[in-house]
Image: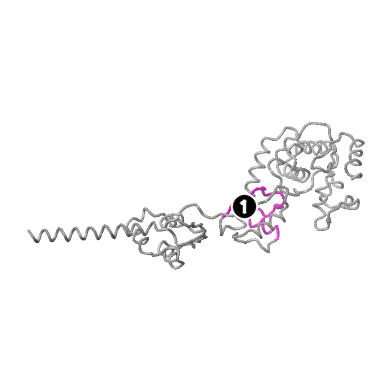
Amino acid sequence: MRWLKLCLAALAVLGLVAYGAFRYWQSQLVQPLAIEQSMLYEVPQGAGFDRVVDDLVSRGVLAEAWPFKLAKRFRPAAWPALRAGEFRLEPGMSGRAALERLGSDQVVTYTVTFPEGWTFHQVREALDDAVKLKHTLEGLDDSEVMARLGHPDQHPEGRFFPDTYRYHKGVSDKAILARAYARMQSSLDEVWSERDADLPLKSPYQALILASLIERETGADGERARIAGVFVRRLEKGMRLQTDPSVIYGLGDDYDGNITRADLQRKTPYNTYVIDGLPPTPIAMPGMAALRAAVHPADGDALYFVAKGDGSHHFSATLREHNAAVRRYILNR
C-alpha cells in the first residue's frame, strides 16, 4: 500500500514536471522577438525551417531554436512551408507569428511607375533605377529587349501600358515589361472591339499611334475626344496632322526645348508637317482614356487647335480663326 502511494506521488511529481515543461515550451513559442524596431528579413531560396530558425537565433531575433524545431517535429502540418522572399518583422511579434509570416503571402513589395505619355527610353531608365529588381536587360538595345520579350519585329514605343507595377525582390525587369506589354495588348484589343464605325483607321496599331498623339497633346479629360475628333477629320480630308509632339519625337536628342521653323521643315518619319497621315509608330505610352478617345472621337467641325497656356486648347473650324487664336495665345505671349 505504501509502495502504491509512493508510485502515485512520483507520477504526480512527474506529471507536474511534464506540465511545467510543456507550459515553458509553449511560452517560448509566443515570446516577443528581441527587436526594438521593424526589420526586413529575407528567406533565401530553398532555405528549410531549421536553417531559418538557426539564422534568427544567430541574429538575436529569437532566444532559442529548440522550442520551434520541437514544435515543427510534433505538428508539422501546423506550420506553413517557408516562402522565399523579404518579410517585415515587427517589435512585439511572437516567434511563432514571425515564422508564420515567413510562410505567408505577406512578402515585402516595391513599385515602379510608368506615367502616361512616357517614352520607352524613360521606361527603361525607370527600370534601371528600380530597387530590388533583377536587372537582366541592361546593355541591350531596344530591338534586343523586344526579342527577349518574344516580339522581335515590333517597335517598342507605345507597346507598354502606363501604370504602377508591384514586384518583390528578385523579380526581373523583363517580367515587369511582359506584364505591361500584356496590359497594353488587352486594353487595345478591348477598345478596338468597341470602336466607332467608319473610322479612318485600318488596324488596332493605328489606333495605338493615334492615341499616343492624343496623349502627348493633352492631359485634360474633357479634351481628349475633341482632339481625337480634329485628328480624325484631318485624316478623312487628307490634311496633314501637323502635331508638334510628333515633330519633337522625330528630332530626338536634337530637340532643345524649342521648335523652330527649320524643325517644322525637317524631313523625319515623324514630322507630321511633312508626312501624310499617321507617323510610323506611336510616340509615347497612351493611357486608357487616350485609347478610348482614339476610337470614339468627338463630333464637330474643328480642324485646328492651339494651346492656350493654361493646360487647355482653343479649337477652330477655319484657318482664319486658328491663325487669330495663334496670335492671341502664342505670338502675343
The residue sitting at 79% across, 47% down in the picture is: 279
Extreme-left residue of the structure:
1
What residue does disc 1 label? 178
Relative to 75, 287 lies left or right: right
Residue 81 image position (x, y, % from top left) = 42, 56
Residue 3 image position (x, y, % from top left) = 9, 61
Query: How many numbered callouts?
Result: 1
Q: Nearer the viewer, residue 313 or 45?
A: 313
Residue 123 image position (x, y, % from top left) = 69, 54
Please determine whether, in this image, residue 56 is positioned above or below residue 167. Answer: below
The amino acid marked with disc number 1 is: Ala
Q: Nearer the viewer, residue 229 or 328?
A: 328
The residue sitting at 84% across, 52% down in the picture is: 268
* Residue 152 is inside the magenta segment: yes
| Quadrant in which the N terminus appears | bottom left
Please determine whether, in this image, residue 220 is positioned above or below residue 25. Answer: above
Relative to 139, 88 lies left or right: left
Read off the magenta span.
Answer: 141-167
Mark 1 neighbour density, 10 Å: few (under 14) some (14–19) many (20 or more): some
Residue 259 image position (x, y, % from top left) = 87, 51
The residue sitting at 25% across, 60% down in the picture is: 17
